Amino acid sequence: MVVDAWMQHGTVRFLQHEMLDSLWRWTGKKPPEQEIPVQETVKAMDGGGVDVGLISAWYGPEGALVSNDEVASFVAAAPDRLKGIASVDLRKPMEAVRELRRCVNELGFKGLRIVPWLWERPPTDRLYYPLYAECVELGIPFCTQVGHTGPLRPSETGRPIPYIDQVALDFPELVIVGGHIGYPWTEEMVAVCRKHPNVYIDTSAYTVRRYPPELVRYMTQDRHHKVMFGTNHPMITADRALVGLDELGLGDEAREAFLEGNARRVFRL
């Protein structure tokens, strides 16, 4: 099995948002004019050998770019292949907690994702803390982005130290998944991952051949590493993301943990 820990099945309003202009420029593609059929995302997963993809909602200050109910409808169209990750309006803590409960208890979602740069609030902001407590109670991970931002927004909120480090100290029971590797602070992210037993890294937004050497050393030298595969689909597809995997030199146990084991445990798949 291969699990993709960070995907989007985006709506047109999300994929055409001006903040993603830089990403489309890098990929040489243009955002779609019409809604994409779920089967297109499943087809892309098949092309890269991905069995299960975790697709997330996106909420920002302007509202839902991909709503939780839209994600639920996408999952319903391919329930054996797609699993939902919730998002919420960070500015309304109690409404956000109630919505998270609904997503997990009624919709079967597997985690919560909030992208700090979208709100320009680091993960240590007080508005996150009720959600961290609820994630612990619900037994789901908190997923976020670490590292610089490709979209045209400030990058400071993605620093692993002090932000992820402090959250892990305040909530040692909280499982945290830092997506997008943490570059250019990859060494910091690896250090935080080694320090805290419930902190993980996912490789979304990077192809295998672009993994920083600090990350590769961690994955190859520690068969119990806490790195999981992700693409950031549709910006990077699985067939591109995994090219060169055999060249990393991962042992069987480390490879299994990377491609499926860590994600299966964290997201309770």
Image: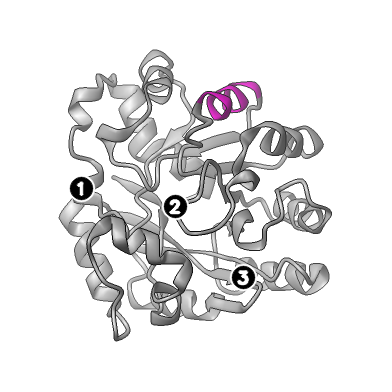
Q: Residue, x 18% and y 39% (percent of image)?
A: 243
Up the image or down, 166 lies above or below 80; here it is above
Please tell me whether the stretch drawn in magenta is mainly helix, strand or loop.
Answer: helix
Of labels 3 and 1, earlier in sequence is: 3
> How many neighbours does mark 2 have within 10 angstroms: few (below 14), some (14-19), or many (20 or more)?
some
For the magenta stretch, what is the residue range?
187-195
Name of the residue lying farthest toward the bottom: 34
Residue contact at pointers 3 and 1, CB within 8 angstroms: no
Up the image or down, 95 lies above or below 224; here it is below
- Quadrant holding the N terminus: top left
Residue contact at pointers 2 and 3, CB within 8 angstroms: no
Q: Residue, x 20% and y 47% (percent of image)?
A: 240
Residue named by callout 1: 240
In the image, what residue type sits under mark 3? Answer: Gly
- Check residue 150 in the rendering and tell me which mark sits there, or answer none: 2
> What is the distance, in whole Å, between disc 2 and disc 3 at their CAs?
16 Å
